[in-house]
Image: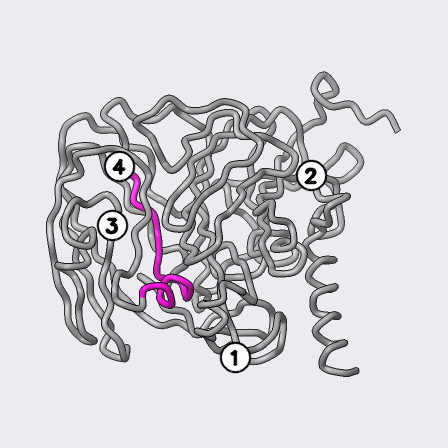
């Protein structure tokens, strides 16, 4: 088999694994099965992410391992420690990349606080790193969103303090001069500053990050995928990823995200970029409530199908779940799904609801 044929084969294997072809995206599970009355339904155990275990040497962040909603009503102080570290992690089976991360995960840990809180941010640069790192939080008023106070050499730490005086869901990312490369390779996350009145209650919350990865090697080529700055300048990524891997939250990879019929779920998306806009869409559902650009101070929009999420921004959306099945989260620039790896799924478990959906075939 020629190299070109092998690359095409890898793409076909991904498309088959992902099951998100344009014509059948909402009907085909990534494992090749469909959640319906004729298929045994998995039991939903404690916690909402009950797929395969995420291995400790992966950068893929558990989408449910996030701080819970704010439950206090007076200002507090929070100590946040972010460690810049490099991690070799799997993009696809047999394909790895040396990611740049905060705390070893992509996206970086969600920071959650309340309007009026004080945050003490410490950035530590691991001694084995070769470059400086910093942090730019879009929740901060000040030089570089804090980058001017936090750039730190390998083996060093710096701390700065800010007051969160406006609400919203904001990106944070490395803010050094070549930040585009650092973000592409994983150094971005979300900081949620809840408004004083809090957010509407939901049953479950999920947190994912979208970013492009630019490599010298083609999609699926085995071995180490080396970063390619020229492709980044051309804005021609090899991969468009959720959370540092091709289709991470599907049955055939690390397991679907889980919810139950009748619940409401909230999805926090942070778009690292560094270059592409995400047309964020839940195949098989709509955003019942949506806060574009993470604008939590505003009234949510209702019943939004697809929303543009620009690089360096966020999206917060709620979904109602009246029927069982699979909701596939995608960038609706669909070639990024079928050719570059952008897919994740929420598996809704429960009984059929013919009042809402009745398959008569």
Q: Which residue is mark 3?
A: 137
Task: Please name the residue that numbered disc 2 is placed on.
Answer: 41
Stretch in magenta: 179-193
User: Would you say 329 lies left or right of 17 here?
Assistant: left
Q: Pick out the residue farthest to the bottom.
A: 2
Q: Nearer the viewer, mark 2 or mark 3?
A: 3
- Decide which of tag 1 and tag 3 comes sooner along the chain: 3
The picture places residue 148, in percent across and down from the top left corner, at 15, 59
Q: Farthest right residue?
A: 361
Q: Counting other residues with Cα less than 10 Å from the Cα at mark 4, is it few (<14), some (14-19), or many (20 or more)?
A: many
Query: Residue 175: within the magenta?
Result: no
* Label 1 element class: strand
Instruction: State which mark lies toward you, 4 or 2.
Output: 4
Q: Would you call the spot at circle 3 few (<14 residues within 10 Å), some (14-19), or many (20 or more)?
A: many
In the shown orientation, is residue 154 left or right of residue 249?
A: left
Reading the image, the residue beneath label 4 is 193
Cα separation between marks 4 and 3: 12 Å
Find the distance from the CA under tag 4 to the CA under tag 2.
Answer: 37 Å
Residue for point 18% across, 75% down:
155
**27 relative position to 165: left or right:** right
Which quadrant of the view contains residue 184? bottom left
Q: Is residue 180 magenta?
A: yes
Q: Earlier in the sequence, mark 4 or mark 2?
A: 2
Q: Disc 1 marks which residue? A: 224
Residue ranking furthest to the top: 355
Foreground: 11 or 263? 11
Closest to the camera, between mark 1 and mark 2, is 1
Residue situated in front as seen by the camera: 250 or 335: 335
> Mark 1 and mark 4: span between their CA atoms?
38 Å
Mark-to-mark CA distance, 1 and 3: 31 Å
């Amino acid at each position: 088999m020629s190299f070109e044929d092998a690359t095409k084969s890898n793409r076909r294997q991904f498309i088959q694994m992902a099951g998100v072809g344009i014509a059948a995206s909402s009907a085909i599970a990534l494992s090749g099965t469909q959640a319906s009355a004729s298929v045994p339904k998995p039991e939903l155990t404690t916690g909402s992410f009950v797929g395969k275990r995420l291995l400790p040497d992966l950068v893929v962040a558990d989408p449910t391992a996030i701080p819970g909603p704010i439950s206090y009503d007076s200002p507090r102080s929070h100590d946040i420690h972010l460690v810049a570290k490099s991690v070799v992690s799997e993009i696809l089976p047999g394909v790895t990349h040396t990611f740049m991360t905060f705390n070893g995960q992509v996206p970086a840990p969600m920071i959650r606080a309340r309007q009026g809180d004080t945050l003490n941010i410490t950035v530590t640069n691991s001694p084995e790193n070769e470059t400086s790192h910093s942090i730019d939080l879009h929740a901060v008023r000040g030089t570089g969103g804090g980058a001017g106070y936090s750039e730190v050499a390998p083996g060093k730490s710096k701390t700065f303090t800010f007051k969160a005086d406006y609400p919203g869901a904001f990106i944070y990312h490395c803010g050094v001069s070549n930040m585009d490369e650092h973000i592409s390779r994983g150094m971005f996350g979300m900081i949620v500053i809840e408004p004083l009145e809090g957010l509407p209650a939901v049953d479950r919350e999920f947190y994912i990050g979208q970013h492009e990865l630019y490599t010298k090697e083609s999609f699926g080529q085995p071995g180490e995928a080396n970063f390619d700055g020229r492709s980044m300048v051309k804005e021609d990524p090899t991969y468009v990823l959720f959370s540092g891997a091709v289709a991470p939250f599907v049955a055939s990879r690390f397991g679907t995200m889980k919810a139950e019929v009748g619940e409401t779920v909230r999805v926090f998306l942070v778009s690292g970029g560094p270059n592409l806009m995400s047309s964020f869409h839940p195949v098989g559902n709509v955003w019942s409530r949506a806060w574009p650009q993470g604008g939590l101070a505003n009234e949510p929009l209702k019943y939004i199908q697809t929303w543009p999420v620009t690089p360096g921004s966020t999206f917060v959306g709620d979904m109602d779940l009246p029927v069982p099945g699979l909701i596939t989260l995608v960038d609706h620039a669909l070639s990024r799904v079928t050719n570059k790896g952008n897919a994740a799924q929420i598996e809704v478990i429960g009984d059929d609801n013919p009042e809402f959906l009745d398959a008569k075939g």
